[in-house]
Amino acid sequence: MLRRVLILSLLIAAVALGASRDPRRLLFVHIFAATTDVPPLDPPVDEGSDVRWFDDYFTVQQIDADTFAIGEPRYHDRNYNYLIVGDERAVLFDSGPGVRDIVPVVRDLTMLPVTALPSHLHYDHIGNHTSFGEIALVDLPFLRERSADSGVLRPTSAEHLGFVEGFRRPYLHVGEWLAVGSEMDLGGRRLQVLHTPGHTRESISLYDRDRDQIFVGDFITEGPTYAFVPTASLGDYLRSAVSVLEKIGDETRVMTAHRLDPPGMPELARDDVVELRDTLLAMKRGELEPTGSFPRMYSLAGGRQVAADLPWGHSWE
């Protein structure tokens, strides 16, 4: 009974907020959390000859001699985190939800200093960040100003969304602020920091021009593109898709943060980003008919979907 009362109260509040976009979206996520149980871990499956099980939870797939996909295929969101190694230091791009400690996996692959860098601040991407001595964040004013005095940033509830699965918001001790467009020098390897908002306003991608690799977090995945969560923006998504396409080439490997089916890591290609851009353009022109209530689902030609807000919550500016 109490749960039904809570759900009804949240629904009434969501309707009352009307077109107040982010608070309404946050309430819908609360409704989802109140009505949905966290799925148990999936059973392990055959991941193919290119993948090794590190233990009964993590997998490791070697992309090249210095780049590794650390998978969590038993977790319901099937997260993939990327260890990118140079001659002097390494970057862990995302660290999973924190269901298990990722540090032993990282230390099995490199003993160099490791900087934990999130693609964005959702709970399933920063769950192990506090286990690393060095944390980096993209240098955006709305993030920097909140940690100006202490050097510590705690994601807001809308940025983190950890209440969905009972994860607490961490305190991130930021040791390195990365300017948009700057390059991280790992020693013999450089990664360009691209601001690619759309899924969230702080979302970034890492572009390795020399190896023709781009690591994109949740900017695009094998499953639905989530453009309905707090701070998501269809206009930002479209601009980011255009800017990414201006950077990458026809053969660029696009490494994403979630996969649908085995085996191995989720890897897409330039054509998938083209498809996303073209779908967003068709949505902007009103050429696509969505399905569902909330989120509204817009089908991409290749079978994936864009999950968007209600029409009055769309923002193309």
Image (tube, rainbow, N blue to C red):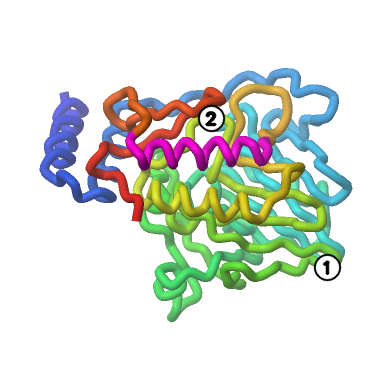
Give the SS element for disc 2. Answer: loop
Instruction: Classify the position of the C terminus by image quarter.
Output: bottom left
Q: Residue at x 58, y 72 (%)?
A: 179
Q: Quadrant of residue 229?
A: top left
The span shown in magenta is 268-286
Residue 223's disc is 2
Left or right: 133 as drawn, with respect to 97: right
Q: Residues within 10 Å of mark 2 (few under 14, many from 20)?
A: some
Q: Main secondary structure of the magenta part?
A: helix
Expressed as whole percent of the image width and height from the top left, the position of residue 243 reads 57, 55
Q: Position of residue 113 (x, y in %)?
A: 76, 64
Residue at position x 18%, y 26% in the image: 4
- Mark 1 lies on residue: 187
Magenta-drawn stretch contains 269: yes
In this picture, residue 51 sits left or right of residue 255: right
**Nearer to the camera, 224 or 172:** 224
Q: Is residue 104 visible?
A: no
Cα–Cα gap, marks 1 and 2: 34 Å
Query: Residue 1, how many percent across, how many down?
Result: 16, 23
